[in-house]
Amino acid sequence: MKKILSIFVFLMMILSVSAVVQYIGQPIFPYIIFGNVNWNSQLLGGARIEISNANTGYSTVIDSNIDGYWQDDASNWLSNNAARPPVQFGDSIKVKTLDGCGSADTCEVTFTAFSTGNENSARKDLSVTGALLPKAEGESSGGGGGGGGGGGGGASVPQWVCQEWTACDSGTQTRICTQYQFTRKEKQDCVVSEPIVTPPVEEPKVPTEEPTTPTEPIEPIVPPEPESSLYAWLIGLIATIIGLFVWGKGFAGLIKYKLKQADKAEKAGNKELAKKYRATAEKMAKSVITNYMAGKYKK
């Protein structure tokens, strides 16, 4: 009886899986279901995530990327009826990790589509601590319509193989580590050392001689030739004679003036004054040159 019941349940599962069809009704808005997979507080890439809709019987398995992130658009799922949207308000959606689920981990989350907090999309992060096991031979990840076995804890696993650290960028450097099909990204702080700048050696500057502009020869200033000494002597002699002549005439006139004054004083009866005028005239006329040039003063 138990065998018959098991066969019946198995056939019903096959029929329920084969019953999902492509939705052909009115277009619906995308409904994104997404999240991260954390393994021992590290984002885990390559983890298999099973997402299923209990109301349509559809399920799919996708992988998290190298950053431990996964997402799927429920509007592209199959449905149990071509006229029924693949996801609608009230559908019970389950998200489950198939890898790294330990005995004390919560490996699946169930929520109601389009409910409060999940109106336009739904974020469901998963955190596990169990051992990571390789995929079974022939088992594939991604795509739809399939399930997968859970990873058990306690098995020995090989060490993670890590790449070289990347160059320091904004105080952080990363590296990718792999184990089986799984990947995780490690980060650490770093310090960028300042490059040693060697000052350039300046080559000695060789002074360059600027071309000199030839200057025009300066013609010597030739002073005017001095006048003939004879010419100068004649000029001086003539000037002296003229000067003496003028001086003599003037002096002679003064003598005559004194004599006239003497005559006036004598006529006036002042013989003493007349005598004085004549004495002065006599003294002025003693010079031979004056006597010659002025003529006789008595005339």
Image (tube, rainbow, N blue to C red):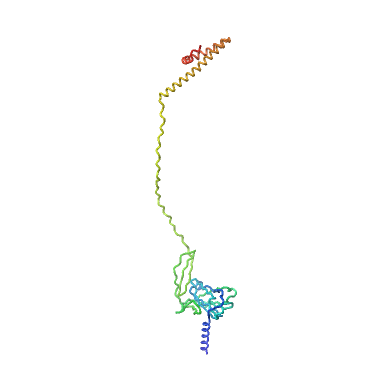
Q: Residue furthest right?
A: 116
Q: Against 200, is 66 above or below?
A: below
In the displayed structure image, the side of residue 112 where residue 132 appears, left or right: left
> Where, by quadrant of the figure, is residue 92 drawn?
bottom right
Q: Position of residue 144 (x, y in %)?
A: 50, 78
Q: Position of residue 19 (x, y in %)?
A: 53, 82
- In front: 44, or 241? 241
Q: Position of residue 292 (x, y in %)?
A: 47, 14
- In front: 102, or 285? 285
> Where, by quadrant of the figure, is residue 217 drawn?
top left
Q: Residue furthest bottom?
A: 1
- In front: 16, or 160? 16
In the displayed structure image, the side of residue 87 where residue 293 appears, left or right: left
Q: Against 81, is 189 above or below?
A: above
In the displayed structure image, the side of residue 20 where residue 225 appears, left or right: left
Q: Position of residue 36 (x, y in %)?
A: 52, 72
User: Count the marks: how many?
Assistant: 0
- In front: 131, or 91? 91
